[in-house]
Amino acid sequence: MTSLKDDGYVWLRNAVAEPDILNIENLLSKAMMPGQRIKLDTQILSVLNNEGSIGQRIAPYLENPKATRLVSFDKSNTMNWAVPWHQDRVIAVNEKADLDGFKSWTRKSEVWHCEPPTDILENMLFVRLHLDDSTFENGPMEIIPRSHKLGIIPAVDADAISNKMASHICTAKRGDILIMNMLILHRSKPSKNPSPRRTLRIDYANFDLPFPLEWSS
């Protein structure tokens, strides 16, 4: 059994019941596009936050979890891609502000994103909810266990580090949840199979950002 603290990830197999998955699909039916950032409205938050069906699964690993960013991925034979080894080190916020440690500002889908200080990332979770089976053939995510303990990894060093450490291919069934430390190294290869591989990425925190920043909603 893996440990979120030591290994940087933990699986919750068969974590979400079919009625809850259908409810999520209904809420997000118009938003499931590759890399689509989804607005966290009241209905969606009612599912993702502490009192909701997904948030309740996350709560044992992060007290009072609050979803701070939601991104959909819909990999198929017509929408296919590969992503090299990397860390996701951005957060979504309400506005741009000149604060020490907050850098690399970009605006995506009309939302400000930035790279925050490392201690913020270290206290967040990166969660994937699988809406379809993820197999060896349809481009599953691959992670490097324990890489979160290395802190910030420059992009130019990611391949060299991954070659020295064992990887884990994240095959999954519909309804499985993968919980990870935000700084874990990961990548994704192209799909070799026409079957869809829809997943939701949900970033979680349980603290406020320094004024005047707030989590994007």
Image (cartoon, helix red, strand yellow):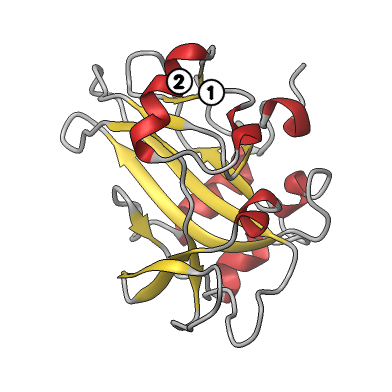
Task: State the image coordinates of residue 62 (x, y, percent, origin top left).
Answer: 78, 50
Residue 10 makes an appearance in the image = no
Please state which of residues 149 and 74 is positioned toward the viewer in this rendering: 149
- Indicate the quadrant where residue 176 lies: top right
Classify mark 2: residues with Cα within 10 Å, few (<14), some (14-19) or many (20+). some
Classify mark 1: residues with Cα within 10 Å, few (<14), some (14-19) or many (20+). many
Residue indicated by mark 1: 144
Residue at x 59% of width, y 34% of height: 175
Task: State the image coordinates of residue 121 (x, y, percent, origin top left).
Answer: 61, 53
Alpha-carbon span between mark 1 and mark 2? 7 Å
Residue 136 makes an appearance in the image = yes
The label on residue 100 is: none
Looking at the image, is 17 positioned above or below residue 137? below
* Residue type, numbered disc 1: Ile
Q: Residue furthest left?
A: 78
**Local secondary structure at mark 1:** loop
Residue at x 40% of width, y 50% of height: 72
Please state which of residues 25 and 31 is positioned toward the viewer in this rendering: 31
**Horizontal side of residue 194 vs 164, given as left or right:** left
**Horizontal side of residue 145 vs 65, given as left or right:** left
**First of labels 1, 2 by sequence position:** 1
- Indicate the quadrant where residue 157 lies: top left
Task: State the image coordinates of residue 140 (x, y, percent, origin top left).
Answer: 40, 24
Task: State the image coordinates of residue 31 (x, y, percent, origin top left).
Answer: 35, 59
Q: Is the residue under label 2 in contact with that under label 1 (CB below 8 Å)? A: yes
Please state which of residues 44 and 148 is positioned toward the viewer in this rendering: 148
Residue indicated by mark 2: 162
Looking at the image, is 137 positioned above or below residue 93? above
* Residue type, numbered disc 2: Ser
Residue at x 46% of width, y 41% of height: 87
**Local secondary structure at mark 2:** helix
